[in-house]
Image: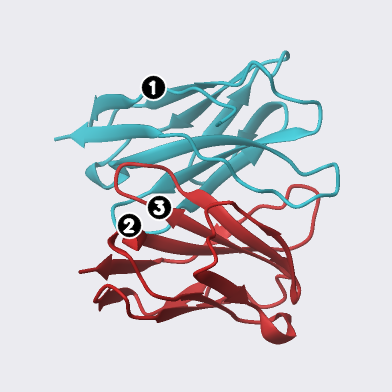
Amino acid sequence: DTGVSQDPRHKITKRGQNVTFRCDPISEHNRLYWYRQTLGQGPEFLTYFQNEAQLEKSRLLSDRFSAERPKGSFSTLEIQRTEQGDSAMYLCASSLNGVTDTQYFGPGTRLTVL
Amino acid sequence: LAKTTQPISMDSYEGQEVNITCSHNNIATNDYITWYQQFPSQGPRFIIQGYKTKVTNEVASLFIPADRKSSTLSLPRVSLSDTAVYYCLVGDGVSGGYNKLIFGAGTRLAVHP
């Protein structure tokens, strides 16, 4: 078990470009979460998957954001027409459906929009 | 809004025991208490979780009084590498729903030589 992995670790893009991030959860974890973290703040919830089903999206997730989890394994988060305000750390977490739903986080993808 | 309140920052010295207290006056019956540690440019790392009384693992201890309105994370004999932000969260897991973590600002612990 190698933990949650995310790719890429860093992404620099120009405003208006599209970017896609990937998250590979801990194997057999059926729950997957995306969070966003800006400097000096705690992570903020973006969206949640139970297997392949996306069950909740935060209001923070504008129409330019889309997330998928085909086949209930890895997940992708795409941001279209990036804006400077999208610059942040994007974190993925996974958990095993259980009483406490303990989430384990990946290392994050740092996005910088120029 | 985060359901917890914790000090914004704390300072300590190597070898000392550090206790970080978190208030969660409105904790619900189903809520567990979870602590995460986060280093700069890394994802939060799970430290410890508990429901009541005391929980201990190889990294820390978690003390929870009977009324569960607060909890204390205890880090024994800290080292410089324990300098990080520590988050206290309460979450509803027993209801069977997923756990949308709501982070506050956390406690910035600085360990000095």
Q: Which residue is mark 3?
A: A37
Q: Residue furthest bottom?
A: A71
Asked which secondary structure carries label 3, the reply is: strand
| Colour chain B appears in | cyan
Q: Is residue B57 visible?
A: no
| Colour chain A appears in | red
Q: Which residue is mark 1?
A: B7
Mark toward the start of the polypeptide (3 vs 2): 3
Q: Gap in Å between the C-alphas at discs 3 and 2?
A: 12 Å
User: Alpha-carbon neighbours of circle 2 within 10 Å: few (<14), some, or many (≥20)?
Assistant: few
Please state which amino acid type lies under the numbered disc 3.
Gln
Asked which secondary structure carries label 2, the reply is: helix
Q: Gap in Å between the C-alphas at discs 3 and 1?
A: 20 Å
Asked if A39 appears above or below B20 in the picture, the reply is: below
Chain hosting mark 1: B
Q: Quadrant of the C terminus of chain B?
A: top left
Marks 3, 1: nearer the viewer: 3
- The verdict on a common chain for dots 3 and 2 is yes
Q: Residue furthest right?
A: B95
Q: Which residue is mark 2?
A: A85
Marks 3, 2: nearer the viewer: 2
- Residue B11 % position (x, y): 24, 25
- Residue A20 % position (x, y): 44, 81
Horizontal side of B16 relative to A98 (left or right) equals left
Please state which amino acid type lies under the numbered disc 1.
Pro
- Residue A57 % position (x, y): 65, 58
- The verdict on a common chain for dots 2 and 1 is no
- The verdict on a common chain for dots 3 and 1 is no
